[in-house]
Image (cartoon, grey):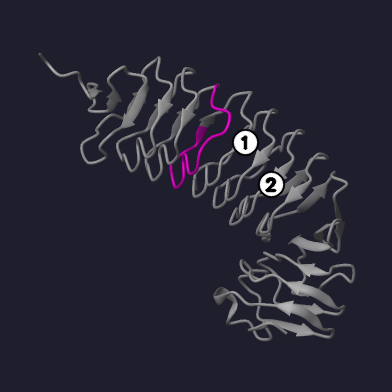
Amino acid sequence: MALPKKYNIDEWGVRYSSDWKTLIGADHTTFQCEHYRIREGVTHIEANAFYHCQSLKSLWMPDSVTEEEGCLCEYCKNLEKARISMNIKYPDIAMFNSCTSLKEIELHEGLKCIGENMFSGCSSLQHIKIPSSVKYFMGDTFCYTAIEEIELPEKLEKIGHDTFFGCDSLKRLVIPAKVAKICPWLVQAHENFEGLTCLSPHFRIESDSLISNNNNELIACWARDKVYHIPASVKILGSICNNMIETIIVDSPLKKIGRDAFVGCKNLKRIIYHAPVKHADISYQCEHIEGAPTKKW
């Protein structure tokens, strides 16, 4: 008696489960399809399904898919276009991480979050429409993309770390009213960044900086002056992330300077203290900065 198949293989060498409901993945060393359509009826996609498939230029995902395990097309350098199932609510990690040719992505209403590293390193991605249903941006969602303008959905509640870090083409951000949490390194301010507008009552803007009302933490700074004075109301220095500042001056006492507060400050040369800091550490990436703390004070 013949044994049942462990899996099926389609014409392009892509493996599926024996019932065709799970996409197992393609072997990037032999996969040669440019425009791939995942089979109708597939409900689950395993991790790294098309990892490093360099021939892939477009990927179409049917609405039968309800779950994928992450890293779907990570490092597919020639992928230009993709469609996501309208029944994917919470994308797993790094779905399109480092797809440097990606220009067009079709997302659907019903999507609840933009997954961690979902579009990180997609250096050709200039425009994206975020569904109004999205409530969460996980970490590193759009960092190092070519996005120029983006409309954040009104239902957005949380913005994860490094969301727009390294986005050198981004011009402006408007934080919606329902956002209650913003993690450090929101944006790396640069010469063409015009600034940030905040509609959320959980944050305020002072001296071209975004500050949390909850703990008086400075989260982002887009000041254009080479010399920047930390606002007196700030008690925690979370992240500056500014490419234009060369000198930071602390005029009022601080409770804490975060370990990576100065990461992303490409031109920062010195920090001058006119007031004490209760607790401060230093990231290895900031050791070149004159006056940067090297241990707890």
Q: State the image quarter where residue 69 is shown.
A: top left
In which quadrant of the rendered image does the N terminus lie? top left
> In the displayed structure, does residue 73 sit left or right of residue 25?
right
Would you name the residue on which mark 1 appears? 113
Q: Residue furthest front?
A: 1
Residue type, numbered disc 2: Ile
In which quadrant of the rendered image does the C terminus lie? bottom right
Task: Please state which of residues 16 and 156 is positioned toward the viewer in this rendering.
Answer: 16
Residue type, numbered disc 1: Cys
> In the displayed structure, does residue 33 sit left or right of residue 70?
left
Residue 102 in magenta? Answer: yes
How many numbered marks appear? Answer: 2
Q: Is residue 263 above or below residue 95?
A: below
> In the displayed structure, does residue 113 sit left or right of residue 55?
right
Verify CB contact (< 8 Å) between mark 1 and mark 2: no
Q: Which stretch did the figure color magenta?
A: 87-104
**Tag shown at residue 159:** 2
Structural distance between the alpha carbons of marks 1 and 2: 10 Å
